[in-house]
Image (spheres, grey):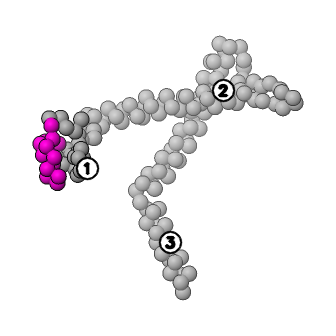
């Protein structure tokens, strides 16, 4: 009987976790991120790498390699991965993060300024406009919270 109730409780806990907004948002974000990365990898492999290769004279970065003691080191794959990472980061920052931050500022969703701070003497949270701590009665100087 104990195993069944433990299993049931665990399943209920998992269901509560799975239907939480954060878990669903994360799953959607991962799925979209994977698709977005595939698109950026295609752009890097099909457009950016050939353009960079035209400048440096190498047709395909993935074929760049060297051999040490019989071991093949394919550093071209690393170059392709770094270019892809930079392209993804650039694209996400300028086409997602910057516009969303601008929209948040325009809609007034910036983080509100704090209205309380800990007392320097007793660490009780008190209003920033206070000149004396209500807990320990410490006299607070002008600009005490800075």
10 Å crowding of disc 2: few (<14), some (14-19), many (20+): some
- Nearer-N-terminus badge (1/3): 3
25 and 136: which one is in front?
136
Q: Residue at x 66, y 26 (%)?
A: 79
- Percent x, y for residue 85? 57, 32
- Percent x, y for residue 35? 55, 42
Residue carrying label 1: 123
- Nearer-N-terminus badge (2/1): 2
- Nearer-N-terminus badge (3/2): 3
SS at mark 1 in the image: loop
Residue 70 as seen in the image, left or right of residue 41: right
SS at mark 2 in the image: helix
10 Å crowding of disc 3: few (<14), some (14-19), many (20+): few
What kind of secondary structure does the magenta stretch mostly adopt? loop
In the image, which residues are magenta? 128-141
Q: Residue at x 49, y 67 (%)?
A: 14
Q: Is residue 76 above or below residue 31?
A: above
Question: Are circles 1 and 3 on residues that touch, CB within 8 Å?
Answer: no
SS at mark 3 in the image: helix
Residue 11 disc label: 3
């Amino acid at each position: 009987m104990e195993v069944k109730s433990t299993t049931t409780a665990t399943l209920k806990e998992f269901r509560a976790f799975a239907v939480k907004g954060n878990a669903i948002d994360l799953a959607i974000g991962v799925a979209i991120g994977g698709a977005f990365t595939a698109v950026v990898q295609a752009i890097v492999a099909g457009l950016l790498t050939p353009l960079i290769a035209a400048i440096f004279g190498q047709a395909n970065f993935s074929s760049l390699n060297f051999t040490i003691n019989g071991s093949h080191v394919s550093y071209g794959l690393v170059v392709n991965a770094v270019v892809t990472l930079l392209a993804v980061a650039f694209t996400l920052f300028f086409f997602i993060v910057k516009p969303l931050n601008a929209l948040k500022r325009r809609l007034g969703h910036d983080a509100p300024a704090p209205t309380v701070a800990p007392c320097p003497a007793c660490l009780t949270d008190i209003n920033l406009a206070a000149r004396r701590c209500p807990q320990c009665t410490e006299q607070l100087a002008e600009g005490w919270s800075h």
